[in-house]
Image: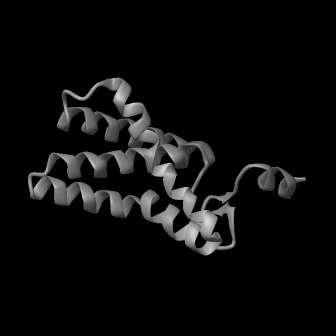
Amino acid sequence: MKKTLQTEEILLTAFSIYLLVHFTPGISFWLWIPLFLLPDISALGYLAGPRVGAFSYNLFHHRGVALLVAAFGYWLSIPMLLSAGLLLFAHSSFDRMMGYGLKYADDFKHTHLGMIGHAAISKSH
């Protein structure tokens, strides 16, 4: 099942990147790399504690939020908003492909996909 979910996330990531390139032509490929990683700044919320960190992280990694931002950008003809939504969606799908999910408020390593990192290794032994 894990491979099936990863394949789904790979396809969602690829499709959202395709849409991003299609709807926002003219932006340098090299600029997309730091922009693609930008949502991870939301993890700085963990400096205020796990509850605030989980909220800020999940806000910028929730695909429903990403789709709403993209839809508003499309309907209101605001290319920057459309791009932001597509970028958030691509980033969130990529994170899930890598095994990172939405966070629970108790620990950064506790996600809706299970434990990540060293916590996952320790739990499996």
Find residue 124 and report its image quarter: bottom right
Task: Give coordinates of residue 40: x percent, y percent.
Answer: 51, 50
Q: Residue at x 84, y 58 (%)?
A: 123
Q: Residue at x 44, y 65 (%)?
A: 59
In the rendered view, would you say 113 is above or below 26?
A: below
- 59 horizontally vs 26: left or right: right
Query: Which residue sits furthest front?
Result: 47
User: How does the figure colour the protein chain or chains?
Assistant: one colour
In the rendered view, would you say 38 is above or below 123?
A: above
- 67 horizontally vs 115: left or right: left
Task: Give coordinates of residue 95: x percent, y percent.
Answer: 53, 47
Task: Give coordinates of residue 67: x percent, y percent.
Answer: 29, 58
In the rendered view, would you say 96 is above or below 71?
A: above
- 116 horizontally vs 86: left or right: right
Q: Residue at x 9, y 58 (%)?
A: 76
Q: How many marks?
A: 0
Find residue 48 and report its image quarter: bottom right
In depth, the one of 104 and 35 nearer the eye is 35
Query: Which residue sits furthest right?
Result: 125
Task: Give coordinates of residue 22: x percent, y percent.
Answer: 20, 33
